[in-house]
Image (cartoon, rainbow, N blue to C red):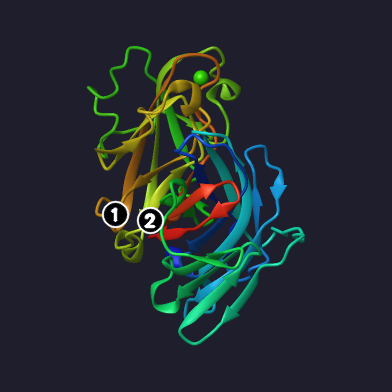
């Protein structure tokens, strides 16, 4: 069995949330937002493969330029520029979508960027600023309508790039799962989570659909899934390897080799049933065979593991933030913090 790194690494689509906050009680219209967005290595290669969506999925005008690249040529810092309406004291969450299938529409205004050896000058129209190459994310000088602005004004909007994560395409951990109802919730006491337990009499089940459609119609309550998964030495040492659960209806407790390693029980049931979650397994996997057991509690309606269980790799995006100072709707300075 090949290690994860031997598998093809397709380019992935992804979404970066960009919450934009107006904390000072002034409604902003067409407020200019310019933000450096960091990308992990290998994620984004084409600056045209990003676009901005609002909360309703409508595309907004966006200008984007790479500020720095990784040694492999992928983009390390992307400068995005757009305008946004934010009501007083409200937060809007725009989304930066990226991926090989993403095509950005042509914006009406062009972002002018002049690159020099030690600095980059950006002109968005009304706003012009300079970023030093050594310290991306820090605005060193800014002008508005030709006038240099040195100090923060009397109000701000904030933009954050929240730490988030992205998954490589996964591969099913197993295609042979076994299943047992547990109406009295005695599985734990009987050691159904333990590797030594003999599940050979349990029924086979798939993990890509609810148990109701696999011979257990009308059952609500607790049930168990078990399988055996193989692990290479490389996988056992891989820090970012996770078990990715597409969704479990409703709550899951995941046991690896008898140890509780994760689950989704803290997510409210009305969301948990359809929400993916990841379980970190570094340091818990043995080279060779491992036993994976999942205790599922389904309160009502459909139940079970229904969107698969895959090995996946987690890439953490770092957080960054911009703080945009303004003294009025038409008057803006900005600073950026990372
Ligand atoms: Ca349910």
Discs 1, 2 touching: Cβ within 8 Å: yes
- Indicate the position of residue 189 as horizontal and vertical percent values: 22, 22
- Quarter of the image with the C terminus is bottom left
Q: Residues within 10 Å of mark 1 (few under 14, many from 20)?
A: some
- Indicate the position of residue 215 as horizontal and vertical percent values: 56, 20
Does ligand 1 reach within 8 Å of label 1's beta carbon? no
Residue 11 lies in what quarter of the image? bottom right
- Describe residue 263's horizontal placement relative to residue 118 as left or right: left
Question: Where is 92 relative to 216, above or below?
Answer: below
- Is any part of residue 2 visible from this angle? no
Give SS at disc 1: loop
Distance of label 1 from label 2 (alpha carbons): 7 Å
- Indicate the position of residue 314 as horizontal and vertical percent values: 42, 55
- Indicate the position of residue 163 as horizontal and vertical percent values: 41, 51
Report the residue marked by disc 1. Answer: 282
Give SS at disc 2: strand
Q: Residues within 10 Å of mark 2 (few under 14, many from 20)?
A: many
Q: Nearer the viewer, residue 141 or 234?
A: 141
Residue 241 image label: 2
């Amino acid at each position: 069995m090949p290690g994860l790194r031997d598998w093809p690494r397709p380019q992935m689509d992804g979404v970066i949330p960009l919450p934009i906050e107006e904390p000072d009680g002034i409604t902003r219209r067409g407020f200019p937002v310019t933000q450096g967005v960091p990308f992990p290595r290998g994620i984004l290669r084409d600056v045209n493969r990003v676009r901005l969506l609002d909360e309703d999925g409508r595309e907004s005008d966006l200008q984007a330029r790479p500020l720095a690249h990784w040694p492999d040529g992928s983009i390390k810092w992307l400068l995005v520029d757009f305008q946004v309406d934010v009501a007083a004291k409200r937060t809007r969450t725009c989304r930066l979508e990226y991926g090989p299938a993403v095509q950005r529409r042509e914006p009406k205004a062009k972002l002018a960027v002049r690159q020099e050896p030690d600095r980059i000058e950006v002109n968005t129209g009304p706003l012009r600023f300079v970023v030093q190459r050594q310290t991306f994310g820090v605005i060193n000088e800014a002008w508005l309508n030709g006038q240099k602005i040195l100090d923060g004004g009397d109000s701000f909007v904030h933009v954050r790039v929240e730490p988030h994560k992205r998954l490589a395409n996964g591969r099913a951990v197993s295609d042979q799962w076994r299943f047992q109802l547990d109406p009295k919730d005695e599985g734990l006491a009987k050691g159904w989570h333990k590797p030594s337990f003999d599940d050979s009499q349990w029924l086979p089940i798939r993990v890509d659909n609810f148990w109701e459609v696999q011979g257990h119609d009308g059952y609500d309550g607790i049930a168990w899934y078990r399988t055996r998964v193989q692990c290479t030495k490389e996988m056992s040492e891989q820090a970012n390897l996770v078990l990715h659960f597409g969704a479990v209806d409703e709550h899951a407790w995941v046991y690896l080799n008898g140890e509780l390693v994760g689950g989704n029980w803290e997510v409210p049931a009305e969301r948990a049933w359809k929400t993916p979650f990841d379980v970190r397994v570094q340091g818990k996997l043995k080279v060779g065979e491992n036993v994976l057991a999942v205790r599922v509690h389904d309160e009502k309606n459909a139940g079970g593991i229904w969107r698969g269980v895959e090995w996946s790799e987690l890439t953490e995006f770092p957080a960054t933030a911009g703080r945009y100072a303004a003294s009025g709707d038409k008057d803006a300075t900005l600073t950026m913090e990372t």
